[in-house]
Structures are given as C-alpha cells and as structure tokens.
Amino acid sequence: MSKKLLLKDAHVEGIRYFDVYRKQGGYEALEKALKMTPEEILEEVKTSGLRGRGGAGFPTGLKWSFLAKPEGVPRHLVVNADESEPGTFKDRYLMEFLPHLLIEGMLISSYCLGSNTSYIYIRGEYSWIPDILEEAIEEARNAGFLGKNILGTGFDCEIYVQRGAGAYICGEETALLESLEGKRGNPRLKPPFPAVKGLWERPTVVNNVESIAAVVPIINITGAEYAKIGVGKSTGTKLISACGNINKPGVYEIDMTITVEEFIYSDEYCGGIKDGKRLKACIPGGSSVPIVPANLLLRTINGEPRYMNYESLADGGFATGTMMGSGGFIVLDEDQCVVEHTMTLARFYAHESCGQCTPCREGTPWMYKILKKIENGEGTMADIDLLWDIQRKIEGNTICPLGDAAAWPVAAAIRHFRDEFEWHVKNPELAKTQNYGLANY
Ligand code: NAI
Ligand code: SF4
C-alpha cells in the first residue's frame, strides 16, 4: 500500500474546517517553519527532491532558488489552480476537501520566498471552490495563522483567491499572470521566467496546488525523509486522477514505486477495466502527453515493467514512452476509437488556442478538420501524411506549450495506431457506424 502524505486525513469528517484540521496536527508544519530561516526551508524543499506537480516536473527547490531578490521590490507566490488539463482533477479534490493543507503550504512557502501577498488563481468552472478556500482563509486568519504578524513572528501574509473565466490557456503560467493583472490571458515569451519578471514585473513563483500542499509534509517529516519515499528522481507521493474505462475512477495518492499494471488492475486503485474488457491504451499524464498502447504501457521496449513515475513512464522517449505530466490517467478499453479520441482532443486544443502564433492558430483547427474527415469515413491516405506533417510543423514552433500539447497526441496516435487511421480510410462506410476495436488487431 502506498504511503499517504497528502490524503492521509482526507477521510476524517469535517477536515475541511480549521478545528478538525488543527486537531489532526494541522498548522504544526507552519509553526515549525516559522522557527526556521527561509534559507533552511529552501534547503528542506531542495533536499526533498519535490518536482512540480502541475505537469512539467521541474524541481521546486531549484525554481525557488531562481527567485530574484532586488532590494525594495515585492515578491509573490501564485498558486496555479487553473486545473483544466482534460483528465486531471486532483487539485480540485485537494482544494475541496483539504483547503487548509493548501493554505498552510502557501503560508510556509510565502515565508520562505518572502511573499507578503500571495494568490490562488482558480479555474472558473470550479465555481463552488473559491467559497471553500475563502472560508478556510478566514478561519486561518481568526486563529492568527494568516494576516499581520503571524504567531507574533513579524511575518505578514495575505492570500487572495482570483477566479479565472474558463480559458484553458490561463493555466499556462504567463497567461495566468496576464489574466491576474486584468488583461487578456495571452502567454508571454520566456525568458524572462516569472521567477525574474512575473506578476506586475515582480519576481514571482508560480506553483501548482499539489506542489505547494506537498511542502507541509516536507516540513513535517523533513526533506530527507520525503526523499526516501519513491524512487530515483521521483521522490515523495503523487496524486493521480484516474478516469475512463476503469472500475474505480477517482483520485489516488501513490508513492511512485508501483507498476502501471498494479495501478490499473489492483483493487486498491483502478480495480481493472470496466465490464471485464481488455485494455487498449492509456494517456497517463493528462491529455497533452502521448497516448501509449497497452503493450508499451505495461512494459518498456526492453520488456521491463513500467512504473508509475517520471522516469519509467518516459522510458523510450516519444517513440515508445509517454510522460507523467499532471497525473491525469485516462484509460481506453478495447472498444474505444483512437481516431475519434484524437479528434476530440484536437477540437479542444483548436478551441483553446489563444491565436497569437500562426502554427498553433492555423494548425490546430486544420488538424481537427482532417481528423473529422477521417473519422467520418471521408479521409484519404494522403490526409494521414498531411496530419503527420502539420503536427511536426507545430511542435517546437510556438510561444507556449499548447502547440506541443496539441501536436503530441496526434503524433503518438498516428505512430502507434496508424493501422486504425488506415482502416477508417479503407472502410469508409464501416467508419461511419462502427468503432475500430482491439478485435481488429
Ligand atoms: P516548463 O518546463 O516551461 O516550466 C516549468 C516551470 O519551471 C515553470 O514554472 C518555469 O517558469 C520554470 N522554469 C523553467 N526553466 C526555468 C529557468 N531557467 N529559470 C526560472 N524558472 C524556470 O513547463 P510549463 O509551461 O510550466 O508547463 C507545461 C506542462 O504543464 C505540460 O507538461 C503539461 O503536462 C502541464 N499542463 C498541466 C495542466 C493542468 O491542468 N495541470 C494544463 C496544461 C498543461
Ligand atoms: Fe497561443 Fe497557441 Fe501560441 Fe500558445 S502556442 S501562445 S496558445 S497561439
């Protein structure tokens, strides 16, 4: 059984409220942290090996150490709660059921980074959660853990909750900052990174909800103990939101030493494929990461078991591996049509493109149109090659990663399921009415 650090108290009735959270040991990490120096906290976070849980897996301690500290210029912590990656809903769970864990993590992180004004930028569609967060903020303030002169230490910290307006692109950190500044959420060119020039051109750390929540157990148990959990550079625990054709969809905390097979089939996690069907493929890290067929999902190209961690999932690079991403684990059974699935994603990215750069603005709707043609039995073999060509021209040629995120699923689908695309072309009438199932292999 995986060790629980973030969700250990999730089952406790009323844990959303301050008194219950406190009774379970809540805010002890903040009390401990405020007796440490900011440099000591940074060292703990670095030692823990914590990697950004939003999707990129960038080392959190390293990002914090990049924060510029010019004299007299305020710094900010911004929590990215604009969780919009299809298949990803772990941050929603944390904020809805354990809001004080996030607030406590933010207070420790803000103290470490020297932020006296910190923000939570939350996805607009999570319409009921800002009230939960604001209630938790008020409770923390009333208990003396937030606001002016926290616990008499002289440290001041305010936390504000800002709602997004439903644009996926505002989860990209610089688009988020633009939106937080009251502007249209267009991504900025990087560098400069937010750590140097972020919110209102001030040094800013933007971190995912889960990353900031993880700071609480890191301080509680120490960075060194946290680093002992997991394997290699995949330290600590990771939340996985599992969905699709499985028996037990939900949010699971894993310690990154379990195999993908165990995660899918054991009763502790997904409980196997629904209705006893066969596993066809999986997108293990949210819609932006490459889809992998069952054989390469469970084993690497060398026949080794694949594990639920950053290194193992990526083993083999883009040709045979995939990515941990945000941990949005989407399972497809034998009856699912990869062409239809890829078309649905292409429609999403075309709709969410901000339109700033040509390859993404023009390429994403073009890919959607071709995929729709193929799915509807109106495609040609040349369309499959054209699709390949378009995704190649988008990847790496855009301002922000949305372009790559739109290209990779198309590339992986063609790479691993080309016969399925060709079946649609060769069987136009069947393609209109039937799905190309595993039985066709
Ligand atoms: P990135 O790799 O460009 O950056 C990661 C983080 O490290 C950023 O905060 C960046 O500012 C920082 N960083 C990198 N190099 C730096 C340097 N030299 N100096 C200072 N800071 C530096 O990736 P990005 O754009 O932040 O995230 C892309 C990922 O987001 C994708 O892999 C995707 O999986 C994920 N994603 C997650 C979503 C969700 O809902 N959770 C939605 C969409 C995408
Ligand atoms: Fe906008 Fe797409 Fe360019 Fe990102 S890649 S800046 S979403 S047009």
Image (cartoon, rainbow, N blue to C red):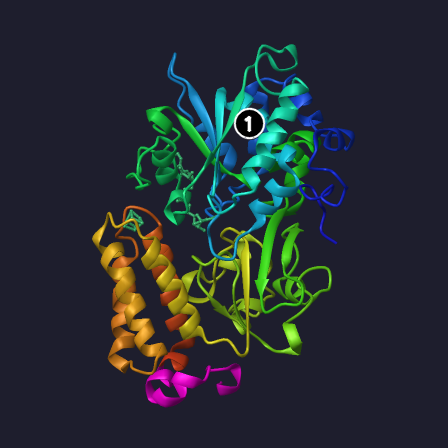
Front in this rendered view, residue 31 or 63: 31
Location of the N terminus (image quadrant)? bottom right
- Which residue is drawn at the image coordinates 27% and 55% (left, top)? 360
Q: Position of residue 276 (x, y in %)?
A: 66, 77
Asked whether 112 falls inside the magenta stretch, the response is no
Residue 105 appears left or right of 414: right
The reply to whether residue 1 is visible in this rendering is yes
Residue of label 1: 109
Q: Position of residue 9 (x, y in %)?
A: 74, 41
Q: Position of residue 222 (x, y in %)?
A: 67, 31
Label 1 CB-ligand 1 distance < 8 A: no
- Which residue is drawn at the image coordinates 27% and 74% (left, top)? 385
Q: How many C-alpha atoms fall within 10 Å of the one at disc 1: few (<14), some, or many (≥20)?
A: many
Residue 119 appears left or right of 257: left
Vertically, is 87 above or below 265?
above
Front in this rendered view, residue 146 or 105: 146
- Which residue is drawn at the image coordinates 29% and 60% (left, top)? 364
Q: Secondary structure at mark 1?
A: helix
Where does the magenta region start and end? 422-441
The reply to whether residue 412 is visible in this rendering is no
